[in-house]
Image: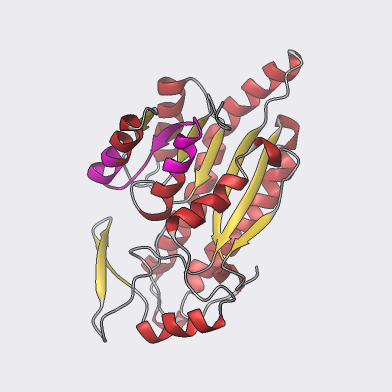
């Protein structure tokens, strides 16, 4: 029996990077997964990968910041798999600048993605989780559900990231609040704060050349100077960045039955570097 046999998991931003690894890990342990990405191609590729391995998955394509996304995401899980057991609020990106050069558009884009979107998803899921939990409790069943919100060591402050750091600090407050509100439903609400994990957003820049990704029609500069990455390796006790699969492992810990009495906690996945 797989650890997550029969569970239904919703993972935002799971067409690429950490989210993809999380989705594959949960599916490998028996979860049926709702995959989300901005673009249909990556989402459908992960769905196919899970199905080819004998698992079950469906895609819910679109931006997590769209006003109708949360309801559509939750509806996809209910109509496809008949329930909600695990919610991973993972989707995100960075759009950096020092505060005097940061536009309102930059501020709200990052806040909306990392903080408002998880709020809307959890709000949309609440009536369904409440109803299922009340029925289970009335029947004498103890069914635990899991929410894992993704934060960052940048929540403790990161120069040039006032928007991102604020959002990642805010999600910790939401995590601790929901752990208190949803305890009566047997829902464990926790967060994982990542350090430097190797993804397309944290790739090394070649010299002074900027790399970009297109997100909702915006060309966003991404990447880290090679010198900064090397300095990070020197400071990190494990001496290297983490991989997406290692990041997924940290999220998975909070999804296990063994964590049924762990709630309102923040796990730093940073190779020994970083606190929140």
Q: Is residue 34 located in the magenta-colored stretch of the structure?
A: yes
Give me the residue at 43% from left, 57% from top: 244
Q: Quadrant of the N terminus?
A: top right
The answer to whether 257 appears left or right of 113 in the picture is right
On screen, 96 above or below 58?
below
Q: Position of residue 254 (x, y in %)?
A: 62, 45
On screen, 181 above or below 175?
above
Q: Does residue 13 appear in this view? A: no
Q: Position of residue 126 (x, y in %)?
A: 59, 32
Q: Position of residue 220 (x, y in %)?
A: 29, 68
Q: Residue 4 versus residue 157: which sits nearer the camera?
A: 4
Q: Which residues are magenta?
A: 23-45
Q: Position of residue 181 (x, y in %)?
A: 72, 40
On screen, 110 above or below 255?
below
Q: Quadrant of the C terminus?
A: bottom right
Q: Does residue 97 appear in this view? A: yes
Give me the residue at 27% from left, 45% from top: 42
Q: Residue 93 versus residue 97: which sits nearer the camera?
A: 93
The answer to whether 39 appears left or right of 117 in the picture is left
């Amino acid at each position: 029996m797989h650890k997550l046999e029969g569970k239904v998991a919703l993972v935002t931003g799971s067409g690429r990077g950490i989210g993809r690894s999380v989705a594959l890990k949960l599916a490998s342990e028996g979860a049926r997964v709702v995959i989300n990405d901005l673009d249909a191609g990556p989402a459908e590729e992960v769905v196919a990968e899970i199905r080819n391995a004998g698992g079950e998955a469906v895609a819910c394509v679109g931006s997590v910041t769209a006003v109708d996304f949360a309801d559509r995401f939750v509806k996809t899980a209910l109509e496809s798999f008949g329930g909600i057991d695990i919610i991973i609020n993972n989707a995100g990106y960075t759009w950096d600048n020092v505060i005097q050069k940061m536009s309102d558009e930059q501020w709200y884009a990052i806040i909306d993605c990392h903080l408002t979107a998880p709020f809307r998803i959890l709000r949309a899921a609440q009536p369904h989780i409440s109803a299922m939990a009340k029925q289970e409790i009335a029947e004498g069943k103890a069914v635990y559900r899991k929410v894992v919100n993704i934060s960052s060591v940048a929540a403790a402050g990161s120069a040039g990231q006032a928007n991102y750091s604020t959002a990642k600090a805010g999600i910790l407050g939401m995590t601790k609040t929901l752990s208190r509100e949803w305890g009566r439903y047997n829902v464990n609400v926790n967060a994982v704060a990542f350090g430097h994990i190797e993804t397309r957003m944290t790739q090394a820049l070649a010299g002074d050349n900027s790399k970009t990704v297109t997100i909702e029609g915006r060309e966003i500069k991404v990447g880290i100077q090679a010198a900064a990455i090397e300095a990070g390796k020197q400071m990190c006790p494990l001496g290297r960045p983490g991989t997406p699969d290692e990041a997924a492992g940290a999220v998975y810990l909070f999804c296990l039955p063994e964590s049924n009495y762990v709630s309102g906690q923040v796990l730093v996945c940073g190779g020994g570097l970083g606190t929140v």
